[in-house]
């Protein structure tokens, strides 16, 4: 038996496994991507495709709901398999994200286009498919905004199964990007800091969040964003979990952080309210029983996971 190692004194699977979009189990086989991998995947009898129309994905809500389609089905929906992105392989075959020319206004039951946020809370899609769909949505968006070279302006082409874009003239290459975003629950004693953005549903309070800037550590981004948004000073930062976030290609890095000040001065152009909530308040918010009607983000959101973990630790 191996000796205990405090570096790994944590649960497995980790909390990231249980957030929305976090259970992508495809084997990506990234080191073996080349110019033949997409064609070989399309020739595999087990190949199945996710069909995208912009930032939405097609769902068959029939007796046996599904989000995977065969190649000929994809073509009937205006899909272009040869322009797809090879996401990886499941136990029964390759999975490819494919753009399709679907007219949403002409869709009839049982078919429906779901945006990714709605899909997050739908019971029609498995957790594994949801993670793969997020992967595909981010990659197809990335390809769609790099149709021309950022260096010389010439048309581009995709290579190695959709994971590289090369200029057809100067050869300039770009690769998929992921934008890191810190999302943090600041805590002080028996209370936590939650804010309300103007675009939130009525009564909803959540954790603060913001993009990591170039040359900045995750910890410093947490400290900066918490102070900029709420005027609260933060000291220690502890990582909790991450969540892929296909809006369009972010990675939410969830942390708990130690507040060392209490007076809130929030930015009114970003927040319409920000305040401290006690554990008792938050328990009622999670149960949707708070007398003021305030509530937390729903499950599957990493903000919910951060809040719930803090409540249960007290």
Image (cartoon, rainbow, N blue to C red):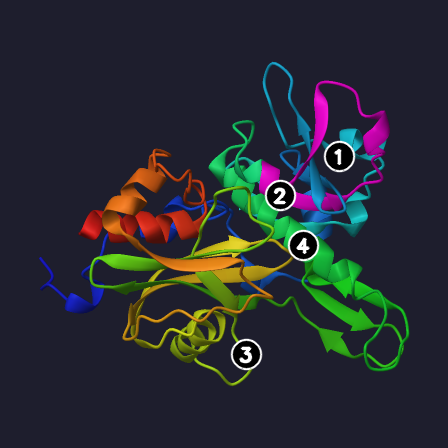
State which tag comes first along the sequence, 2 or 4. Answer: 4
**Residue 222, position as x, y percentages in the image:** 41, 73
- Callout 1 secondary element: helix
Compare marks 2 and 3 and give the one earlier in the sequence: 2
Kindly identify the residue that appears in the image at 56 percent across and 48 percent down.
200
Label 3: few (<14), some (14–19) or many (≥20) C-alpha neighbours in 10 Å: few
In the image, the segment drawn in magenta is: 96-118
Q: Give the labeled residue for mark 3.
A: 213
Q: Which of 105 and 310 is in front in this view?
A: 310
- Image spot of residue 93 (x, y percent): 58, 38
Determine the secondary structure under disc 4.
helix
Q: Residue under circle 1?
A: 71
In space, the residues marked 2 and 1 are separated at their CA atoms by 23 Å
Marks 4 and 1, how far apart in space? 16 Å
Q: Identify the residue under disc 2.
A: 116
Badge 2 density bin: few <14, some 14–19, many ≥20, Cα 10 Å: many
In space, the residues marked 2 and 4 are separated at their CA atoms by 27 Å
Q: For the residues marked 4 and 3, what is the alpha-carbon distance in whole angstroms?
A: 35 Å
Q: Earlier in the sequence, mark 4 or mark 3?
A: 4
The reply to whether the C-beta atoms of the residues labelled 4 and 3 are less than 8 Å apart is: no
């Amino acid at each position: 038996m191996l000796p205990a190692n405090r570096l790994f004194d944590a649960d497995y699977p980790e909390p990231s496994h249980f957030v929305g979009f976090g259970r992508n189990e495809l084997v990506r086989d990234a080191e073996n991507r080349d110019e033949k991998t997409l064609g070989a995947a399309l020739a595999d009898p087990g190949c199945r495709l996710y069909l995208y129309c912009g930032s939405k994905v097609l769902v068959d809500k029939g007796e046996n709901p599904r989000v995977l389609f065969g190649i000929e089905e994809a073509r009937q929906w205006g899909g272009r398999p040869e322009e797809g992105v090879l996401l990886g392989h499941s136990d029964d075959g390759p999975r490819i994200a494919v753009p399709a020319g679907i007219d949403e206004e002409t869709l009839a039951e049982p078919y429906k286009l779901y945006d990714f946020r709605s899909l997050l809370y739908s019971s029609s899609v498995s957790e594994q498919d949801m993670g793969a769909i997020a992967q595909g949505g981010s990659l197809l968006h990335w390809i769609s905004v790099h149709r021309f070279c950022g260096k010389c302006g010439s048309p581009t082409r995709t290579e190695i199964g959709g994971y590289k874009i090369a200029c057809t003239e100067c050869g300039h290459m770009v690769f998929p990007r992921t934008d890191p975003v810190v999302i943090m629950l600041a805590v002080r004693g028996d209370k936590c800091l939650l804010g309300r953005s103007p675009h939130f549903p009525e009564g909803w309070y959540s954790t603060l969040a913001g993009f990591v800037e170039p040359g900045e550590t995750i910890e410093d981004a947490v400290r900066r964003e918490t102070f900029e948004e709420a005027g609260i000073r933060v000291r220690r930062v502890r990582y909790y979990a991450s969540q892929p976030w296909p809006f369009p290609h972010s990675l939410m890095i969830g942390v708990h952080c130690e507040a060392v000040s209490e007076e809130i001065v929030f930015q009114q152009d970003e927040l319409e309210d920000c305040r401290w909530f006690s554990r008792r308040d938050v328990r009622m918010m999670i149960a949707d029983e708070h007398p003021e009607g305030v509530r937390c983000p729903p499950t599957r959101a990493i903000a919910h996971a951060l809040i719930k973990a803090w409540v249960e630790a007290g």
